[in-house]
DNA sequence: GCCGCTGTTTGCGCCCGCGCAAATCCGCGC
DNA sequence: GCGCGGATTTGCGCGGGCGCAAACAGCGGC
């Protein structure tokens, strides 16, 4: 059965708070691990079909409940995706830094966005229309595989958190949460690992299923022991090994 | 850049506890929702590259920690995937009935299987070698899209459980867990909905992050109120609406 | 038909971590 | 430089649900 070459709907990047200038090419995404399996031509075409967009700190990429018209890749900056429950509770589902996808799950399941990703820093993202991206996936198998690999990691992370939340005490969950943050957006500095992601105690609580009070208490205790070094929306791991011990051992 | 047509490694279905008889064709999978977006030719080819396998009740499809050589689709029966933590705790990550995939996440992330799916009934599955399936995905975009849709649902379910586990009290979590089970493998009977999936109180606890004691107590209370009807590894929802109220309202 | 195993029920006490409250601190904007 | 708002710290008390223990019930095998 002959399958016709998929049409990619074209659009120009002049609307909204799109970034003025030329259409993006592969150079913008070449360094991202996500696109490693694509060759230069594929990367160029994928990038050319995206629209770059600046999101100022505090702005949302989209809002929980909206129909999924587009999906995004973070180029620089970072986002935290929070979900509010019908009864007003809030959970931080995910943080995404450079190379992270956002909105893709909803595009594939064709259900409303389940969370609202808010920029924690001025950020730059690429945006693809839903149909454009699925068409690109159909055209480039390597892109499909990159997507399933990424989603697989999402699932494994969610399952890890799920396992933790039902078998581990708060202290360990917090240790795991912080280690995850460090792994994702940590930077080695002279005397430890710095988390380059402005995050509050509240957020850590919302990520680990604890209250900000408990998080604060725990971090204070660790600070006493010289394991971490805290600050306002700032955290440095002085002794990551000790955290690993707390997370896995006792 | 011309991409050569992908070679599909062939194998014959005579080893292990493979099902004797002819190679499966599309008729085995036509009725599954997962394959709806594929046309008949595609379905035939996808099925023809799989090996059918019977799994007796209590047997494992694969074991946590093994390298992901294959992925599976449940045709009949059911599995519960349990994960054991380093410190000996256990969690039920997922239950899979007909039409459910298993092992796919590990195949895509190329990390060891994170859980062990055990058959709760005599079951029949299709098995694809890892490379065979990725090659099929590369050949048939519709298959890739079916996979990402399925994985997207996995992610949404995991996130829902995650949200529940950190914002909801035990009773509601149990209600949600049971409703999820009913939605996935419930059968309408004369006086309610029967869960056609042999499951113990223990398992429900492991799925919802509660102890079997609490689950038992909760179900007993509901039984008093006529909301459910329990039995050994058996459950009937007499008043699903009441459960919905418990799960969502107060 | 009996026995043993596995799943289920129920009681009791204790402890972790939430809920509430209030003080303090730090950075950013003006 | 100053003030304000959001972030953080810390104290106190209570209660949900786990941990432990023991008895009971259904099902399958011999």
Image (cartoon, coloured by chain):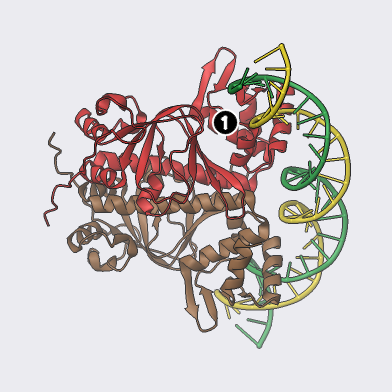
Chain colours: A brown, B red, C yellow, D green
At label 1, counting other C-alpha atoms closer than 10 Å, the crowd grade (few under 14, some 14-19, many 20 or more) is: some
Q: Is B217 on the left or on the right of B53, as rendered?
A: right
Q: Does any portion of residue A62 appear in the rendered image?
A: no
Coordinates of residue A46 in the picture (x, y in percent): 24, 57
Image quadrant holding the C terminus of chain B, namely top right
Q: Nearer the viewer, residue B10 or A140?
A: B10
Which image quadrant is residue B174 in? top right
Q: Residue at x 38, y 53 (%)?
A: B109
Total marks shown come to 1
Q: Is A135 on the left or on the right of A88, as rendered?
A: left
Disc 1 chain ID: B
Q: Nearer the viewer, residue A119 or A26?
A: A26
Q: Is B137 on the left or on the right of B224, as rendered?
A: left
Q: Is B64 on the left or on the right of A224, as rendered?
A: left
Q: In this view, does B169 lie above or below A188?
A: above
Coordinates of residue A126 in the picture (x, y in percent): 33, 60
Image quadrant holding the N terminus of chain B, namely bottom left
Q: In terms of secondary structure, where does tag 1 sit?
A: helix
Coordinates of residue B89 in the picture (x, y in percent): 62, 49
Coordinates of residue A117 in the picture (x, y in percent): 47, 56
Q: Does any portion of residue B188 appear in the rendered image?
A: yes
Which image quadrant is residue B152 in? top left
Q: Which residue is the site of mark 1? A: B179
Q: In this view, does A75 lie above or below B179?
A: below
Q: Nearer the viewer, residue A100 or A49?
A: A100
Q: Is residue C7 above or below residue B141?
A: above
Q: Residue at x 59, y 77 (%)?
A: A238
């Amino acid at each position: 059965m002959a399958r016709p070459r998929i049409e990619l709907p074209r659009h120009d990047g002049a609307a909204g708070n799109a970034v003025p200038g030329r259409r993006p090419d592969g150079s913008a995404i070449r360094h991202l691990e996500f696109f490693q399996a694509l060759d230069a031509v594929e990367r160029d075409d994928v990038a050319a079909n995206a629209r770059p967009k600046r999101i100022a700190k505090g702005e949302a990429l989209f809002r929980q409940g909206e129909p999924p018209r587009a999906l995004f890749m973070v180029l620089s900056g970072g986002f935290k995706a929070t979900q509010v429950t019908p009864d007003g509770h809030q959970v931080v589902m995910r943080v995404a830094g450079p190379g992270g996808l956002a909105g893709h799950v909803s595009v594939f399941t064709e259900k409303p966005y389940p969370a609202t990703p808010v920029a924690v820093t001025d950020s730059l993202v690429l945006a693809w229309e839903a149909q454009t991206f699925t068409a690109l996936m159909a055209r480039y198998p390597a892109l499909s595989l990159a997507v399933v690999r990424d989603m697989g990691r999402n699932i494994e992370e969610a399952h890890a958190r799920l396992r933790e939340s039902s078998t581990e005490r708060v202290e360990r969950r917090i240790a795991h949460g912080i280690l995850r943050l460090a792994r994702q957006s940590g930077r080695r500095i002279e005397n430890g690992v710095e988390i380059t992601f402005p995050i509050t105690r509240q957020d850590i609580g919302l990520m680990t299923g604890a209250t900000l009070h408990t998080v604060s208490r725990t971090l204070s205790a660790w600070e006493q022991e010289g394991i971490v070094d805290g600050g306002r929306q700032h955290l440095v791991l002085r002794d990551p090994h000790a955290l690993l011990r707390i997370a896995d051992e006792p």
